[in-house]
Amino acid sequence: MTTRRLYYDDSYMQNFEARVLSCLPGSPVQGSSGTRPGWEAILDQTAFYPTSGGQPNDLGLLGEAEVLDVRDEDEEIVHIVDREVEVGQVTGCVNWPRRFDHMQQHTGQHLLSAMFQERFGLPTVSFHLGDELCTIDLRGREPSRDELLGGQRAANQAIFEDRRVTVRYGTADQLAELGVRKQVEREGILRAIEIESADLQPCGGTHVKSLGQVGLILVRNCNRVRQDWRVEFACGRRAERLASEDFERERSLASALSCAIDELPEVVDKLAAERDAHFKSLRGALQQLAEAKGAQMAAAAAADGSGLRIVCEVLRGAQTELLLPLATEIAKSERTVALLAMEETGQLVFAQNPAAGRDLAAVLNSVLAACPGKGGGSRDFVRAKLSDAKAAGEAVEMARRIVTLQSEGGT
């Protein structure tokens, strides 16, 4: 039996009466207090919106049963509840704060999508209403910063004008004659949402009666997702909360940096430039240290009968960035192998002078088989990071034994 969808004509309906046609055991469901038994209730009519078209389902109560999910299955709406509901009359109660939030977000999406398409030729190809943010995927070129702000500004202007939002019904051809934004090929009577002088779009979702109830639209970000551009945004109470959080974050940063909020961009740019300069200076100092220390360590290593020298060391309390240039400098000495590790991080760097004739890639594979981690490299140079930093000493000692046993040529 087809379920009558009360939310089609009245998105503001919070309480309703219905007849339970069936309530059968279903799959267990995950609730806030863990996994619970699930029941599937079908009504003759419902105000509960099922997950569809990018909008999540409503929650609430069906009698004394908690509605955990609502699903659209062909012509029937299935209510997933946490206990059995007797067949017969029942009162439904929709979680209004959740419903109204979804109404704000969904109507705001229609408006924002219309602005991007009308003003910048960027059509919306998908929509998702998330717990924190909503997204639309725009097809076409990358929207510029000015276009993102322009779409937001135009949408908010329509909100400030409090334009009407109405439900229309008609066939695809009738809606096409009225200038529907996105045509559909479904037959029969379709439901569409019209925003006065802004948009007409086929939709089965819940919406506010006028744009003033959307409150505000705040565009947050834009990123490439495959061939499209995903725009993040929030409406209504969500937008107010995010704007307040942004202000508090900026206020805290400004206080920490002893500047005014409007001076933050300039101060942050200055700090970034100073950081880059300090990093460049540090890198130069580490290179000088690596050259001096590397030559000293190579000279101090005893050569075996074949002239091979092995520098095996676990560095403690040193800059992580010193590991690689130090190993490189040691390996500049004739027939020398550097086997270095960082005690605090478990990072390994093995490097050799090509004349040493060992196969460090094979050495690393053997080490990682005994001391798990991830890494790789070539015959003369390898890098890795151990899963357990405490195994650094064991790893380099094992590497030293293997290098010592390897014959020249790596066999």
Image (spheres, helix red, strand yellow):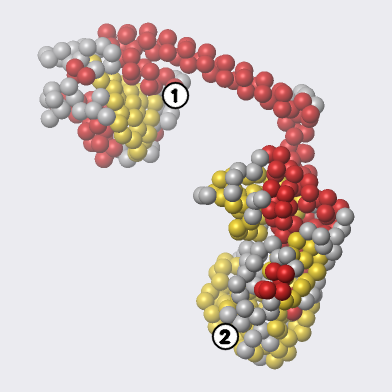
The amino acid marked with disc number 1 is: Thr
Residue at figure coordinates x 52%, y 13% from the top left? 281
Image quadrant occupied by the N terminus: bottom right
Residue 342 in picture, x, y percent from top left: 39, 26
- How many residues crowd mark 2 within 10 Å: few (<14), some (14–19), many (20+)? few
Residue pointed to by mark 2? 24
**In the drawing, does residue 213 fall left or right of residue 336?**
right
Q: Say above or below: 317 vs 126.
A: above
**In the drawing, does residue 1 fall left or right of residue 13?**
left
- In which image quadrant can residue 363 be found? top left
- In which image quadrant can residue 271 be found? top right
Q: Earlier in the sequence, mark 1 or mark 2?
A: 2
Of residue 313 and residue 122, the one placed in the foreground of this image is 122
Residue at figure coordinates x 15%, y 28% from the top left? 410
Q: Residue furthest right?
A: 161
The numbered mark at residue 320 is 1
Residue 191 in picture, x, y percent from top left: 71, 74
Q: Secondary structure at mark 1?
A: helix
Q: Residue furthest bottom?
A: 88
Q: Say above or below: 273 vs 114.
A: above
Of residue 139 and residue 213, the one placed in the foreground of this image is 139
Residue 125 in picture, x, y percent from top left: 60, 58
